[in-house]
Image (cartoon, grey):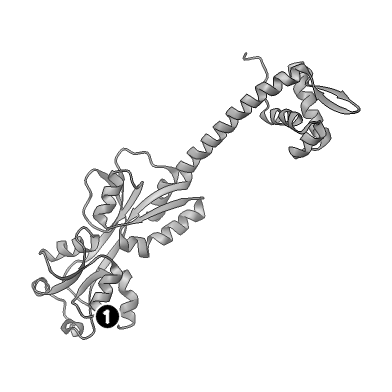
């Protein structure tokens, strides 16, 4: 078997087309070939295998008995080849073109779009994005609902690999009429601990970073499920809030809100997380590289 010539798949497609189109010239047109090129392909196949596929006459070409047998085998081979082609394409799509991302709100709103844009510049990809709080991000990665997650907390989720890909800073903001709005000296933790706050829900990176820096569990006037709701509540005068500096920059610039200096360290890492021991698909690996500044 080692001495036998290889099968030429494209010539098999041409031969099958002869049977379907009724003539070699029609088959050549269907396959995008010139008549001489198609005829040369068939003759080379016949010479290689030392058989005649077509009976040629001035009226056209018809299949020989051998040709009919080759057609039957060719159809099976081409069906399997097309099945393999589709399978390879689906594998390539899964490895190169799909990535399921879970991201906490600040990252999803203000940072991830830039990363995804750079990812699309480097490869064809169809990301699926889930915007949830940091705790839920970790849960989704563990349960294989996401290939990679991005969180905004210093905590390292158990059972996951991680890499710091950036940093973010929280700020305390108040309504311009709030007593803290005119402060020039940093707020002390004990002063802040006595206030009633507008905060994100428990499990969010913003909330956990603030509580860790404050060293106490703050009293909440309102628990907001989104950054927009938090900013709106602070603008309405419900209390001071803690939010990403990125998210509130426009509000501060427009003087709708005032950033209050504090003695707290409110910088937090932005961290990518993924399952331990899992093999990253190409799109996931490329997104991690982009996020890491590579």
Residue 199 in view of the camera = yes
Relative image position of residue 61 (x, y in whole percent):
83, 26
Point 30% across, 43% down: residue: 275
Q: Note whether 187 is above or below 132 in the view shown.
A: below
Q: Quadrant of residue 195?
A: bottom left
Specify few, some or many for label 1: CA neighbours under 10 Å numbering under 14, 14-19, or 20 or more: many
Q: Nearer the viewer, residue 263 or 103?
A: 103
As drawn, the residue found furthest toward the right would be 58
Relative image position of residue 287 (x, y in whole percent):
41, 51
Q: Quadrant of residue 51?
A: top right
Point 32% across, 70% down: residue: 247
Instruction: Name the image quarter holding the N terminus.
Output: top right
- Reading the image, the residue beneath label 1 is 257
Tag 1 secondary structure: loop
Q: Note whether 160 is above or below 43 in the view shown.
A: below
Point 80% across, 33% down: residue: 37
Relative image position of residue 34 (x, y in whole percent):
81, 38
């Amino acid at each position: 078997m080692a001495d036998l010539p290889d099968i030429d798949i494209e010539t098999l497609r041409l031969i099958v087309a002869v049977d379907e189109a009724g003539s070699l010239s029609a088959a050549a047109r269907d396959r995008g070939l010139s008549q001489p090129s198609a005829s040369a392909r068939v003759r080379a196949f016949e010479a290689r295998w030392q058989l005649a596929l077509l009976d040629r006459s001035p009226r056209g070409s018809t299949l020989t008995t051998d040709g009919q047998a080759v057609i039957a085998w060719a159809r099976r081979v081409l069906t399997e080849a097309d099945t393999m082609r589709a399978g390879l394409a689906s594998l390539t799509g899964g490895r190169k073109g799909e990535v399921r991302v879970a991201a906490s709100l600040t990252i999803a709103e203000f940072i991830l779009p830039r990363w995804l844009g750079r990812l699309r510049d480097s490869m064809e990809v169809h990301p699926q994005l889930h915007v949830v709080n940091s705790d839920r991000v970790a849960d989704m990665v563990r349960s294989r609902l996401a290939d990679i997650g991005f969180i905004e907390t210093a905590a390292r989720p158990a059972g996951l690999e991680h890499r710091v890909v950036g940093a973010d800073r929280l700020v305390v903001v108040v309504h311009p009429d709030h007593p803290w709005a005119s402060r020039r000296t940093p707020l002390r933790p004990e002063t802040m601990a006595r206030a009633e706050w507008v905060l994100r829900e428990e499990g969010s990176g913003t909330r956990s970073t603030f509580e860790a820096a404050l060293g106490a569990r703050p009293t909440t006037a309102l628990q907001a499920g989104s950054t927009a709701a938090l900013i709106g509540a602070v603008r309405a005068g419900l209390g001071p809030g803690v939010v990403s500096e990125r998210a509130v920059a426009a509000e501060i610039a427009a003087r709708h809100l005032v950033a209050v200096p504090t003695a707290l360290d409110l910088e937090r890492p932005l961290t990518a997380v993924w399952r331990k021991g899992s093999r990253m698909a190409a799109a996931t690996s490329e997104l991690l590289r982009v996020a890491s500044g590579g």
